[in-house]
Image: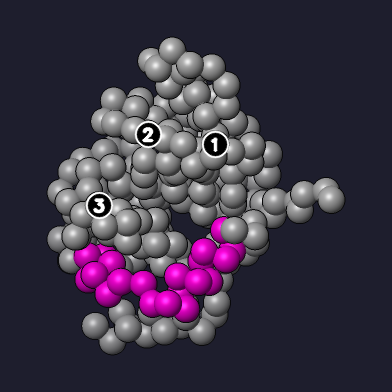
Amino acid sequence: MPRKARVIVPNIPHHIVQRGHNRSAVCANSADRCFYLETLRKLKREFDVNVFAYCLMTNLVHLILHVGDDITTIGQFMKRLAARQTRYVNKIEGRAGALWESRFRSSPIETDAYLLACCRYAELNPVRACMVSVPEDYEWSSYRCKVGLSQKAWIDRDPVYLALAGEDQQRTFRYREFVSQGIGRSERALIGAAIQRNQLTGERALSRKWRENYDAA
């Protein structure tokens, strides 16, 4: 049976998940993760890709990326990113062969409002995996940058995050509050299913709900 085509939509963010081959480690230690992030920083400039969020787990990575008109950019970008990490890990470990699953998974994010939900989903991965109790304790995600606990100038601030407030302090407070609400069962299922099936992520009712919460704040 031919595999289902991946949905790529120009000019909107995409939630990307890439797993290790047979769920093996792709970022086993701090050195692996530093190398991956440095490659991510370099390639985002080369391909003109915006990185809105990331989370590096031991055997998978989450990325929220935004590209322009060329729908081939994401595939080329991810191919280069994966290849560099493979060469690095194989050299360090004296191994050969595949490091990643043959295909990354990708879900276009339907609405601006839903973008923050996907960022929250990615950045709460270490909490769901019981690696930390709160997301600020995990060094290898974009969350600490978004709440002002660390600085990475290359992380892009998406327009929805910027619209949370007019000044940095209030914006980081509101984002912290949003993430602290956690992910409901239906939201987690919706995002997870969209990623698994390479389909669109979005639900207009949920988008309206969180927008109303912040309009009332």
Can you identify the residue that label 3 sits on?
A: 131
Quadrant location of the C terminus in the rendered image: bottom left
Q: Is residue 109 left or right of residue 55?
A: right
User: How many numbered discs sit on the rendered protein?
Assistant: 3
Q: Is residue 10 left or right of residue 205?
A: right
Residue 170: where, in percent of width, then height? 18, 66
Q: Quadrant of residue 61?
A: top left
Q: Residues within 10 Å of mark 3 (few under 14, many from 20)?
A: few
Q: Is residue 17 above or below residue 84?
A: below
Can you identify the residue that label 2 sits on?
A: 27
The magenta stretch spans residue 90:
no
State the residue at coordinates (59%, 49%): 105
Q: Earlier in the sequence, mark 2 or mark 3?
A: 2
Which one is in front, 4 or 167? 4
Which one is in front, 187 or 42? 187
Q: Earlier in the sequence, mark 1 or mark 3?
A: 1
Q: Residues within 10 Å of mark 1 (few under 14, many from 20)?
A: some
Inter-mark Cα distance, 2 to 3:
14 Å
The image's colouring method is one colour
Residue 120: where, in percent of width, then height? 36, 62
Q: Is residue 31 above or below residue 57?
A: above
Magenta-tinted stretch: 174-195
Can you identify the residue that label 1 sits on?
A: 21
- The mark found on residue 154 in the picture is none
Instruction: Please name the amino acid that badge 1 sits on.
Output: His
Residue 183: where, in percent of width, then height? 36, 72
